[in-house]
Image (spheres, coloured by chain):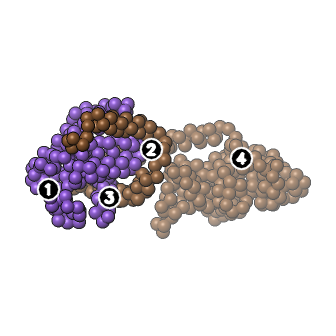
């Protein structure tokens, strides 16, 4: 320093530097956009390192907390467990209530299924019930003249009834799903909305008509999350029944004798005893 | 060249640790200003104009890394570096305690300047009491000196960071 610099030039330089700096700061405020290749490159290189250090730090922090405040963590754990149990039971209760409401709605109005709306439906009246010792069937007043064919699904206002098993020109025999022969690909949604598939079959057996255990049952795997009150729909698998027709409500669940499977008894939505009118769905023709 | 690469790596390390490790080691939300600490260390071992250059360079890299307020760190660190390189000619660099005092004062000055420049440039900074923050940063930086300075100083005088010009011998 000293003689070489005069005061004026220093003042001018300092002023100019300040001005440039402040202008630059102002132009590159947060949220403003400007080309910054060096910064981008630097961030690209350093971010993986930062991520690693961050993760390590995070891990250390969490573990250190668990070690130093072990008692507190244990107490918290205990508390949370209690809360979880309580919430679980609350959840179950709510779910049952919701399902009851759903069921009520389901029972009080005809169900509406986009899948079914695609097909032509033929209304038919039941003219004969034949709950013989062998098959649970009903006879209706529509036959091949009306376009009814074997294996056409049959629904009532509220849900699935069965499928056509025999056709004459003027009548058709319908095997109800309560018969052991009338197997249906069924589906229950668990609490995450994930479908659980099973095969629903009737429990009407020729040799044992006195079953206390409902009229329908589905077999699930042990680990499937099925609860009492869940609605059962057709799954659309198997080819005969379209997807999404309501079948019934899970009434009770038991573990089978092998311990591998769960069997859920299903209360049908349709009251088969008072059934008078049904729709036969022409699944071969889309309307 | 090798020296500059090492310094650049150190700078990157400072940037990374500042946002990660020291996030966990922050006391009441206050973190040290590692880059300023590094620039003070560098300037302690440079001629004034070279120190100014290093301060400005490091500051510009930090600004670009942060991607906003380009020029803020560059200006502050240049000023701090210039001051440090003037002071170091009459300062006992080997003494850790004195270096702690120097770091405390210079960090305080630098942070104060930063707030002033930021406010003057019309930036809306957080409503936290700036004096507390500045004191906190300066104190934290000062605490880091005993841990880091001996190593850096040895590296600058004997190790990989030793500069080749004759300035160091003449000093």
Considering the image in quadrants, where does the C terminus of chain B appear? bottom left
Determine the chain carrying the residue at label 3: B
* Mark found first going from the N terminus, 3 or 1: 3
Badge 3 and badge 2 both on one subunit? no
Determine crowd level at label 2: few under 14, some 14-19, many 20+ residues with C-alpha closer than 10 A.
some
Determine the chain carrying the residue at label 1: B
Q: Height in image: A75 above or below A197?
A: above
Estimate the x, y position of residue B138 in percent, counting from the top left: 20, 42
Left or right, residue B98 beside residue B84: left
Q: Which residue is mark 2?
A: A91
* Mark found first going from the N terminus, 4 or 2: 2
Q: Which residue is mark 4?
A: A114
User: Which of the two residues, B167 or A57, is positioned nearer the viewer here?
Assistant: B167
Considering the image in quadrants, where does the N terminus of chain B appear? bottom left
Badge 4 and badge 3 both on one subunit? no
Determine crowd level at label 1: few under 14, some 14-19, many 20+ residues with C-alpha closer than 10 A.
few
Give the residue drawn at x 71%, y 52%.
A161
Between the C-alphas of marks 4 and 1, the distance is 90 Å
Who's brown, chain-wise? Answer: A
Left or right, residue A20 beside residue A203: left
Determine the chain carrying the residue at label 2: A
């Amino acid at each position: 320093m000293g003689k070489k610099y005069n005061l004026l030039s220093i003042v001018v330089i300092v002023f100019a530097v300040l001005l440039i700096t402040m202008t630059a700061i102002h132009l590159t405020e947060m949220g403003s956009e400007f080309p910054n290749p060096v910064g981008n490159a630097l961030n690209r290189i350093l971010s993986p390192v930062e991520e690693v250090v961050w993760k390590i730090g995070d891990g250390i922090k969490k573990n250190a907390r668990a070690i130093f405040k072990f008692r507190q963590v244990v107490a918290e754990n205990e508390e949370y467990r209690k809360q979880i149990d309580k919430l679980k039971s609350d959840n179950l209760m709510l779910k049952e209530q919701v399902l009851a409401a759903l069921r009520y709605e389901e029972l009080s109005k005809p169900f509406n299924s986009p899948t079914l709306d695609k097909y032509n439906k033929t209304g038919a009246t039941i003219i004969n019930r034949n709950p013989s010792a062998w098959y649970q069937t009903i006879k209706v007043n529509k036959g091949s003249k009306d376009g009814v064919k074997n294996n056409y699904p049959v629904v009532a206002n509220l849900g699935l009834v069965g499928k056509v098993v025999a056709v004459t020109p003027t009548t058709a025999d319908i095997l109800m799903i309560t018969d052991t022969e009338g197997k249906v690909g069924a589906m229950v949604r668990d609490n995450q909305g994930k479908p659980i598939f099973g095969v629903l079959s009737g429990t009407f057996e020729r040799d044992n008509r006195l079953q206390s255990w409902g009229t329908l049952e589905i077999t699930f795997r042990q680990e499937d999350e099925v609860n009492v009150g869940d609605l059962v729909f057709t799954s659309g698998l198997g080819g005969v029944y379209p997807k999404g027709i309501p079948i019934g409500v899970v009434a009770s669940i038991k573990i089978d004798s092998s311990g591998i499977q769960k069997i859920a008894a299903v209360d049908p939505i349709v009251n088969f005893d008072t059934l008078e009118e049904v729709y036969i769905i022409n699944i071969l023709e889309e309307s | 060249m090798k020296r500059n690469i090492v310094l650049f790596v150190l700078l990157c390390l400072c940037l990374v640790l500042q946002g990660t490790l020291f996030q966990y080691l922050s006391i009441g939300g206050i973190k040290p200003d590692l880059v300023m600490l590094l620039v003070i260390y560098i300037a302690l071992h440079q001629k004034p104009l070279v120190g100014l250059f290093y301060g400005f360079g490091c500051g510009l890299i930090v600004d670009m890394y942060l991607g906003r307020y380009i020029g803020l760190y560059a200006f502050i660190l240049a000023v701090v570096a210039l001051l440090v390189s003037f002071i170091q000619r009459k300062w006992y660099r080997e003494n850790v305690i004195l270096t702690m005092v120097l770091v405390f004062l210079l960090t305080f000055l630098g942070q104060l300047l930063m707030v002033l420049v930021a406010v003057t440039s019309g930036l809306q900074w957080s409503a936290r009491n700036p004096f507390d923050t500045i004191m906190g940063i300066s104190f934290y930086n000062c605490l880091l000196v005993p841990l880091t300075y001996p190593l850096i100083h040895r590296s600058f005088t004997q190790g990989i960071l030793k500069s080749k010009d004759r300035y160091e011998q003449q000093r």
